[in-house]
Image (spheres, rainbow, N blue to C red):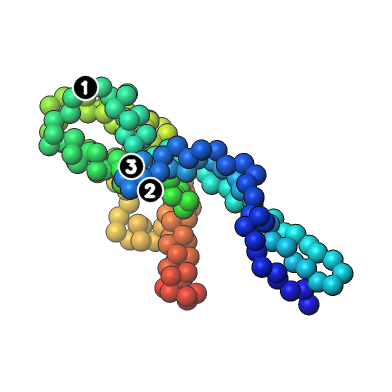
């Protein structure tokens, strides 16, 4: 059986590792640039030696600071502090959700965000500014604000046509919204199963 020899520092070599642009204690500027590096391990026995390279690659995604800056570049008007404080917290949270590996946009997510935003901005002095702010917010996350609005409206219209029984029986029905709900249900069940180590929750 081949034995694993000690791993000297010289066996770890850089293939391509661009400078990291941001790295600090402030979570808003923490960032990894897209990079690739390899670690070579040498296995030896009496007759031959083998080398195995492990390559790791990180995704180049915007930082929270860049997302916030993109929002401010598109929406340049002053925002009253009572709205701005909550809005900035919301964009930070949605940035973290948006760039998670498990993130998946769907019409239910759109309805949830649109509802939260509209309730948060209810009473804002200008409807025009509120709409412009919404567009800048979603653009900052590299998504489509019109798609959010259309999908949210689609779910609302579907819900109005349902009753208590038909909503809970969505899994036995066909339709665009029903298919989305089935997918969400399946993902939730899978996640629950992984967390509890069971096949059912």
Mark 3: few/some/many CA within 10 Å (<14, 14-19, 20+):
some
Mark 2: few/some/many CA within 10 Å (<14, 14-19, 20+):
few
Residue 65 vs residue 144, the one in the foreground = 65
* Image-based side of 166 in relation to 32, left or right: left
Which residue corresponds to the image point at 78% horizontal and 77% vertical from the top-left? 1
User: What residue is disc 1 on?
Assistant: 77
Residue 71: where, in percent of width, then height?
Answer: 32, 30
Which residue corresponds to the image point at 62% horizontal and 46% vertical from the top-left? 14
Give the spatial CA distance, label 2 vs label 3. 14 Å
Which residue corresponds to the image point at 36% horizontal and 45% vertical from the top-left? 24
- Residue 27 in sight from this viewpoint: no
* Image-based side of 188 in relation to 128, left or right: right
Name the disc covering residue 97, or none: 2
Mark 2: which secondary structure? helix
User: What residue is disc 3 on?
Assistant: 28
Residue 107 vs residue 69, the one in the foreground = 69
Residue 87: where, in percent of width, then height?
Answer: 23, 38
Residue 25 vs residue 118, the one in the foreground = 25
């Amino acid at each position: 059986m081949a034995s694993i020899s000690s791993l000297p520092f010289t066996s770890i070599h850089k293939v391509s590792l661009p400078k990291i642009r941001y790295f600090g204690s402030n979570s808003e500027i923490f960032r990894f640039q897209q990079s690739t590096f390899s670690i070579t391990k040498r296995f030896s026995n009496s007759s031959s030696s083998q080398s195995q390279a492990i390559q790791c690659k990180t995704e180049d995604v915007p930082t929270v600071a860049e997302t916030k800056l993109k929002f401010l570049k598109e929406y340049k008007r002053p925002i009253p502090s009572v709205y701005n404080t909550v809005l900035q917290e919301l964009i930070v949270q949605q940035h973290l959700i948006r760039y998670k590996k498990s993130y998946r946009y769907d019409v239910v997510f759109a309805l949830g965000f649109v509802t939260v935003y509209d309730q948060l901005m209810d009473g804002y002095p200008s409807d025009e500014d509120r709409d412009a702010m919404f567009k800048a917010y979603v653009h900052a996350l590299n998504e489509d604000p019109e798609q959010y609005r259309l999908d949210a409206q689609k779910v609302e219209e579907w819900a109005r046509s349902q009753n208590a029984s038909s909503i809970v029986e969505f899994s036995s029905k066909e339709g665009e919204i029903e298919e989305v709900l089935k997918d969400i249900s399946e993902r939730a069940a899978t996640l629950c199963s992984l967390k509890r180590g069971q096949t059912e929750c």
